[in-house]
């Protein structure tokens, strides 16, 4: 009898069934390139279908299995363990950390810019309130 590792060795696509925040079910697919040189991750949720990063892909890449749909995933934990090996093998775990660090930095900058925008709106409102002379 083959182990799950032996069965998955030739498998190039693993689908993980997840539940969205609204209770809708989605499929996150992990597809290893045939040449072993890369890994593609996709999700059929609305954001993922538009080619955007979604919370489903992010959660699974980071090792959060709490979003997995238990109805479909019961007994398929070994497949997710294999996905996590791929995540490490292809360096996706490091890329995810870099991505999150960049987003955090951008959020700080976004807050600074929002304050500047608010201050400028107030400044211009004062100019208008004081009256504009030609």
Image: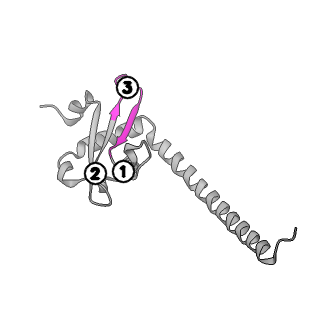
**Residue 103 appears left or right of 70:** right
Q: Position of residue 118 (x, y in %)?
A: 68, 68
- Residue at image position (64%, 57%) is 109
- Residue at image position (46%, 37%) is 91
SS at circle 2: strand
- Quick one: label 1, few (<14), some, or many (20+) residues within 10 Å? many
Q: Which of pointers 2 and 3 indicates the residue nearer the eye? A: 2
SS at circle 1: helix
Q: In which quadrant will I find the C terminus?
A: bottom right
Disc 1: which residue: 56
Which span is picked out in magenta?
31-44
To which quarter of the image does residue 110 belong?
Answer: bottom right
Mark sitting on residue 18: 2
Distance from Cα at disc 1 to Cα at disc 3:
24 Å
- Residue at image position (33%, 38%) is 30
Decide which of tag 1 and tag 3 comes sooner along the chain: 3
Disc 3: which residue: 36
- Quick one: label 2, few (<14), some, or many (20+) residues within 10 Å? many
């Amino acid at each position: 009898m083959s182990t799950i590792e032996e069965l998955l060795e030739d498998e190039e696509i693993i689908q993980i069934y997840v539940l969205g925040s609204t209770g809708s079910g989605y499929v996150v697919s992990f597809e290893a390139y045939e040449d072993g040189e890369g890994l593609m991750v996709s999700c059929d949720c609305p954001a993922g279908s538009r080619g955007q990063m979604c919370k489903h892909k992010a959660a699974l890449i980071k090792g959060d299995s709490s979003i997995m749909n238990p109805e479909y995933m019961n007994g398929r934990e070994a497949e997710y363990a294999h996905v996590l090996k791929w995540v490490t093998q292809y360096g996706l775990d490091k890329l995810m950390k870099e991505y999150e660090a960049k987003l955090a930095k951008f959020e700080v900058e976004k807050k600074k810019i929002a304050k500047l925008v608010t201050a400028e709106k107030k400044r211009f409102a004062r100019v208008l309130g004081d009256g504009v002379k030609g």
